[in-house]
Amino acid sequence: MNSSVQGHVGSGTLGFTDNRFETMISGDIRQQLRAKRRALTAEQQRLCSERLASILCNESFFLRAKRVGIYLANDGEIDPSVVLAAALKADKTCFLPILHPLKKNKLYFGQYDSGTKLVNNRFGIPEPTINSTQIAPPWSLDIIFMPLVAFDRQGNRMGMGGGFYDRTLAFMKDSKRLKPKLVGLAHGCQEVETLSQQSWDIPLHLIATDQEIICAKQR
């Protein structure tokens, strides 16, 4: 791990109590790790995508799953397109996140297959159009594969800062639900030693990289 981002990082913080300073540190860490993943070449990204799929697609939780939430890679995120293709080939029903048009920073999940019409959302990320796809509540999915900017081995996740997944999955916060299984996907270089968990954060069950699957060990 790059020493410039190593250490105790709280949802992007470094353990300081001043909220403005925490936000600044969070932004610094986020920008560093986003730049790191964007620096990967197209060939490196392709190899990482293939390695990720070779690991994930043989896992029992993936083989058993019938309804899979997944994403289309953006901003240097590890690309799950090979996993998506394998899921569709295995007749799994797949869903992509859609920005909720009414509720701020929340997501829908819209059914996706090779014939689904996609349009770019306000961040330039393709998503199904709400009026042309089946919408699924997140609790109805078996797995949700989630992008991230940083992770630790306790299952803490730093996203892009909008809180979309945390708000969407808030129903899991005060329960022992094991479904959907939340799996963060990342390049190995996105690992940090510690991310402090905030009250609104929804931890991951697993993290999958192109090298390994990490079972989160919650503190």
Image (tube, rainbow, N blue to C red):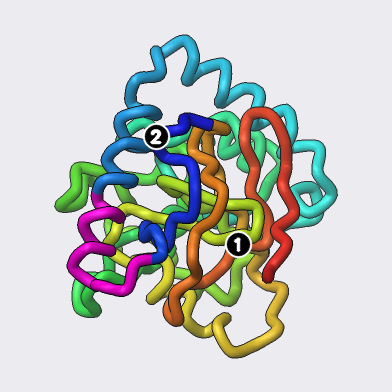
Residue 37 at x, y = what percent?
Answer: 39, 29
Q: Mark 1 points at which residue?
A: 204
Q: Could you tell me which secondary element the residue under label 1 belongs to? A: loop
Q: Nearer the viewer, residue 3 or 175?
A: 3
* 46 to 37, vertically: above or below: above
The residue carrying mark 2 is 4
Does 1 appear above or below 138? above
Query: Extreme bottom residue here?
Result: 174
Q: Where is residue 78 in the image (x, y as percent from the top left)?
A: 48, 33
Is residue 184 visible in this depiction of the protein? Answer: yes
> Count the marks: how many?
2
Give the residues in magenta. 16-27
Q: Distance between the residues labelled 1 and 2?
A: 24 Å
Q: Is mark 2 on a helix, strand or loop?
A: helix
Q: Position of residue 54 (x, y in %)?
A: 72, 28
Residue 79 makes an appearance in the image: no
For badge 2, the amino acid type reads Ser
Residue displayed at 34% across by 20% down:
39
1 or 2: tag closer to the N-terminus: 2
Please state which of the two labelled residues, at mark 1 or mark 2, is closer to the viewer: 2
Viewer-closest of 25 and 151: 25
Crowd tier of the residue under label 1, counting other residues whose Cα lies within 10 Å: few below 14, some 14–19, many 20 or above: many
Amino acid type of the residue tagged 1 in the rendering? Leu
| Residue 165: x %, y % from top left | 41, 66
Identify whether 97 is placed above or below 16.
Answer: above
* Label 2: few (<14), some (14–19) or many (≥20) C-alpha neighbours in 10 Å: few
Please identify the quarter of the rendering in which residue 126 is found.
top left
Residue drawn at 25 percent across, 72 percent down? 18
Instruction: Tell me if residue 83 is in the magenta stretch.
Output: no
19 within the magenta span: yes
